Structures are given as structure tokens and as C-alpha cells.
Amino acid sequence: MARAIQNTAKRTIEAAGADKVISPYDLGARRMAHAILRPTVIRFLELAFTDDATDIQVEEIQVKSTSRLLNVELKNSGIRQKLDLIILTIKKADDTLIFNPTADTRIEVDDTLVVVGRAKSLTALERMLRS
């Protein structure tokens, strides 16, 4: 990963071997545009990614082979019903992403769940997915 100050430097940095190039100016410009066009989305993301404003967080948790939820469908997992968490995305072992997975989606080994909810519930889910 590398940082580019100018857009013209991105290609050079990638050619030198960086797998990800980030421009603070691009990020800032996008952030400003989103703040104008989607203020509620930005407010939610700010709440979810800062620890001081709320207990809501977004986390990614990898499913281990020892998980008690292995091969369980989301609708039977208790993630939504008992923990009050929302699964935004599941990244499969082959790097494909399942956005807004259906209730019939099975939890499989090496899946990475992107989850939003309260910190206490996220901690409980992490224990369930790792042991």
C-alpha cells in the first residue's frame, strides 16, 4: 500500500509494485461529495467508525473451522434474532462477495462476515464464529 499526492503518480506507484494506492485528496473530495449528496449515510458511517459517539460498530469476522455456526443457514443462526446484528456482506474463501445475503445463505469455513451492530453483540458473534 502506498500514498499518492498527485493523481499522475498513481500509475507510477502501481508499476513499482504497490497493490493499493491511496490519494488523500481523492478521499477528501469523495467524502465532501457524499456529505452533500448522502448526508444520512455519512452520518451513519461516522457513528459506526468512531468509538466515542455510539455503541454501533461495523466489524469483519472470519469463520473458523471450529465454529458452532459452521454450515448453518443465517435464518437458523440466531445472529439477527438473538444478537440483533445485521450481516451486510459475506466474503467467501474465493474472495467473491455476497451483498445482503439471503436467510438461506449458509455460513462456511473461511467466510468473512461484515456485520453491523452493538459492540457487545459483535463480541458474542466473534466467539461463536471462532470457537
Image (spheres, helix red, strand yellow):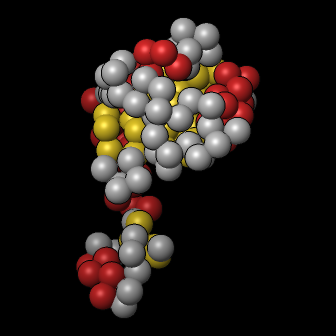
| The image quarter in which residue 38 lies | top left
Residue farthest along the top direction in this orientation: 81
Q: How many marks?
A: 0
- Residue 74 vs 49, above or below: the answer is above
The spot of residue 69 in percent (x, y) is: 56, 30
Q: Residue at x 39, y 75 (%)?
A: 19
The spot of residue 57 in percent (x, y) is: 60, 30
Left or right: 12 with respect to 92?
left
The spot of residue 128 in percent (x, y) is: 66, 31
Residue 3 shows in this picture: yes
> Residue 22 or 81: which is nearer the viewer?
81
- The quarter in which the C terminus is drawn is top right
> Residue 82 or 122: which is nearer the viewer?
82
Q: Residue at x 62, y 37 (%)?
A: 67
Residue 42 shows in this picture: no
Residue farthest along the bottom direction in this orientation: 16
> Residue 23 or 112: which is nearer the viewer?
112
Q: Residue at x 64, y 43 (%)?
A: 66
The spot of residue 62 in percent (x, y) is: 56, 45
| The image quarter in which residue 35 lies | top left
Q: Residue at x 32, y 44 (%)?
A: 97
